[in-house]
Amino acid sequence: MGGAPASAAPFARDLALVVLAKAAVSALVLALGFRAVSDDDFARVVLAQAWAHAPQLDPTGTSWLPVPFWLNGALFLLLAPTLDVARAVAFALGLASAALVYVSARWITGDRRAALAGALLAGAFPWSACLGVATVPELPAAALSLFAVASLVTPPAGPAPPAGRALLGALALVLATLSRYEPWPVAVAFAALALLAAARLGQGRAAQAKLALAALVALAGPAAWIAWNRVAHGEALHFLARVAAYRNAVSPGGDGSLLRLFAYPAAMVREEPELFLSPIALALVAWRARRGAARGARAPRPCPPLLHAALPYALPGAVAAFQIAALSLALVRDGAPTHHPERATLLALLLLALAVGDLTARAFRGASSGARRALGGALLVVLFIGVVFRPHLRREHFNPRADEVAIGRAAAELTPPAAPVLVEVVDYGHLATLAALGRPGGAHPDRSVDPRDPPVRSSFDDPASLARRAADVGAAYLIGRVRPSVSAFAGPPLETRGAWGLWAAPASPTRAAPPAGPGDGAPGRAPSAEAAP
């Protein structure tokens, strides 16, 4: 933190409290049944399993950035390539993200209690809570971005941050920009701000050199990815073309340009209304208290001045606004995520949560008992409005794929590890089955449902097609929905989970009978698991 040694113990205690609180929130989210934001969560697990099975520099060969697959794939190699390990990694990354957010809050505010209040709120609002256990990199990428921006902030009491801190922020941005695309505008803003800081009068040469180096390092991730796309695909911006092609295939025509331009701000307000209503409530209570004091009436003592306390958020807020503007322009040009746009605004939501927690803590700490009661009542009203109106706000819903996961786990337990398995593809839910099965070398989706590919009829629709497809891949087992066409070919299922079943495939002339024990059977090819660009 760059503070005195005496401050190390309180800092460690506060950090431990934030991490424990985040662990409790994550445990609650899991207890309530949340498992995934979308099928992308399972796709990322399947692709990391494939990387662990056959490591390569570019894990997917698509537009998806490599760092999350390197990390999860390496841990799969050390532990086991299972969905449970992936979810444990996601849980741990959520805790690490909470720690980064707390350090960022200390750097921004310079106030221990305000930073603690902000970090606790930032770890608990709904999207932060859900992304803290999902197998996607949005929360770690946003926390790394916040950490980077905070490294350039001068807190109200000073002093200016040491130049070496900016290098830490730049390294954080390398990880963030090679995990998600939304930190790319943040890296551009960070580089510009670091160069401006280096040009300030009074900086020593060593500090200027560190800041200039930080600016270059911050851009290293995007530069490396662009260079790789030029070498591997012959086009530097190949990834943008893939994203645009996928979006156009999913929603040809789509929304109008004006709706797309404001899609991200609208998603933020729609998904986290309490974070936007709370500052309004805080401002109204402060205004009422000051107005009563100005009239000389017996009113609560005015709330402490909060505008000065909010000033350190100006620079991070400007960076977040720049990021959202850049994402909005990318969305207009079809170069942004195809669903759940609020995921991409997580940096701004984390920053807003920090500010709300910080300013609320200061208000309670410095106001009279009457003003505290008024503020508490206003915040209860905000929570009530959120509870009442949240269910009616338009949101993207998702099937947690519980049955698909369950049948994949059953197949992993009941079939030999090397036995090839043919998996019915109804929609992208088959990725949940593949992730739970954990066999990148032996699981075969029966068809592609990528909207960019020509539509193909499922081989599970009739016994003859299923027999041909099973023979083509040498399938020893089948996973699909329980229906007459499958039973006519393979007989009764060995196991069922919900609407899904597991069958032993009848032996064909080109394939021996299903292996009887672990280690037998022919290896298959790694499945295609591209559920998004």
Image (cartoon, grey):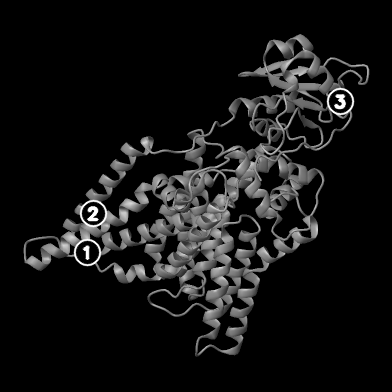
Q: Are marks 2 and 1 in contact (CB under 8 Å)?
A: yes
Mark 1–mark 3 CB contact (< 8 Å): no
Instruction: Indicate whether 237 appears above or below 136.
Output: below
How far apart marks 1 and 3 lie (CA) works out to 74 Å
Task: Tell me if residue 125 can be seen.
Answer: yes
According to the image, label 3 marks what residue? 472
The amino acid at mark 2 is Leu
Callout 3: helix, strand or loop? helix
Of the residues under marks 1 and 3, which one precedes in the sequence?
A: 1
Residue 262 percent across, percent down from the top left: 44, 52
Local secondary structure at mark 1: loop
Q: Give the Cα separation between the discs numbered 2 and 3.
A: 68 Å
> For this view, does 431 lie left or right of residue 5?
right
Amino acid on which disc 3 is placed: Asp
Q: Residue 117 in the image: x percent, y percent?
A: 38, 58
With respect to residue 352, does 170 lie above or below? below
In the picture of the structure, the residue carrying the numbered disc 1 is 303
Distance Cα–Cα, label 2 vs label 1 = 10 Å
Front-most of 109 and 244? 244
- Side (left or right) of 297 relative to 31: left
Q: Earlier in the sequence, mark 2 or mark 1?
A: 1
- Nearest the viewer among 159 and 270 is 270
Which numbered circle lies on residue 375?
A: 2
Determine whether 329 is above or below 200 in the image.
Answer: above
Q: Quadrant of residue 114?
A: bottom left
